Image (spheres, rainbow, N blue to C red):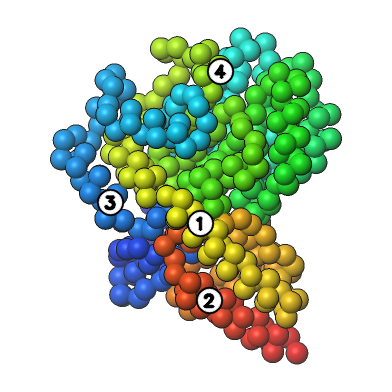
Amino acid sequence: MTFRLPVYKQFKIDVDKAEGAYIYDTGGRKYVDFISGVSVLNMGHRPPEVMKAVESVMAKYLHVSNLYPEQNQKEYARLLVERTIPGKVFFSNSGAEANECAIKVARKYFDGDKYEIISFVNSFHGRTLATLGATGQAKFKEKLGPMPPEFIHAEFNFLASAEEKINNKTCAILVESIQAEGGVNVSNPEFMAGLRKLCDDNNILLILDEVQTGMGRTGKFLGIQHYGVEPDIVTMGKALGGGLPLGGTVIKDRYAQCMNPGSHGSTFGGNPVACAAGMATTQLITDEVLKAVSEKGGLLMGLLDNLKKNYQDIKEVRGKGLMVGMELDYEGAPLVDHLFGRGYLVNCTQDKVIRFLPPFIIEEHEINELAGAIEEFFQKRGEKNE
Ligand SMILES: Cc1ncc(COP(=O)(O)O)c(C=O)c1O
């Protein structure tokens, strides 16, 4: 009997502890973590530098509130601005809240005169009602309607579709550089550059949801940094708190100016322990680490592409850095179960897309071994179907 709302499909595992790239169950069995808490533990579980930072804040306080300036929050905001876009940071607790803040700023900047936001089919922006409205997938909204009507969905990677949705009520375009939850759909460079131009030409804001693609996941600190396009607002979450709950919205000064004391807030947002953990994690994500992310991602995609040549089970392999999707020709759950049995944790999204999000410290031999375990599944499946 469970006392928790049954909203999650869960692996049959009793987690005992986690360290580095591994999760251990209470029976002492080790699993190689190719999920990283859904792109949260980018530098792995419990890096010593992060644990030290957390412990040193906890020795002083757990929470002080946003009524006082706090050192970790101040320093982390500065570091994030350095690594993203010039502007101001608002800290919250989650990715959805980071997007809520972006939506509010975009509306407030236009004094509430412009309020429509264009987002994209297959996007995912969170589970609050506004961010669910922005999310471009019907399955998350079933029987929850009516949704806030000010979110208009255009086709991803199809510039003309976004262009035709713009009107004099549009205040922003909200987009992911890779639609992660939506099946690891990578945006193409012309699309991103085109969105920037559309926003400039129509005096509307470009908001990049980097909640899942941010913090080095794709081989650059932000996914959008592959495209040479500068957004007006960047939203972050997941790995931002180095394993603790933290959301962040970085807003260019020009737009940040419309916010003043009282216009937004959060009790826990920017918790000092979470900021210290996030800052220690961000400091670990050096250029060298980003290069390794690209190389290890290249290795994984190369191995999967090779499998694709030999097995029709794979329809497509796509991704950037260590966010890799392998779309199967059939439902992915049996492969997830097979890999679980072999000691690998992987996730399936959109029913058929196996999503790999390992921590950046994953070792090359572990990537090779994972590919071997996947091939074993295809072979067995082939034999069964003969
Ligand atoms: C791109 C993107 N935006 C927003 C969110 C929502 O983040 P949270 O679950 O922290 O609210 C997610 C979560 O998966 C996400 O992938």
What crowding class fits label 4: few (fewer than 14 Cα within 10 Å), some (14-19), or many (20 or more)? some
**Disc 1 target residue:** 291
Q: Which residue is mark 4?
A: 255
Q: Amino acid at mark 3?
A: Glu
Viewer-nearest residue: 128 or 308: 308
Nearest-to-viewer mark from 4 and 1: 1
Given this view, does label 1 or label 3 mark the residue nearer the observer?
Answer: 1
Find numbered disc 3 in the image and state the secondary structure of the residue it sits on.
helix
The residue carrying mark 3 is 49
Is any part of residue 120 visible from this angle? no
Taking the image as shown, residue 233 lies to the left or right of residue 200, namely left
Q: Position of residue 99 (x, y in %)?
A: 54, 32
Q: Is mark 1 within 8 Å of ligand 1?
A: no
What amino acid is at disc 1?
Answer: Lys
Against 235, residue 46 (above or below) is below
Mark 2 and mark 3 lie on one chain; the one further toward the N terminus is 3
Quarter of the image that includes the C terminus: bottom right
Q: Tag 2: residue type?
A: Asn
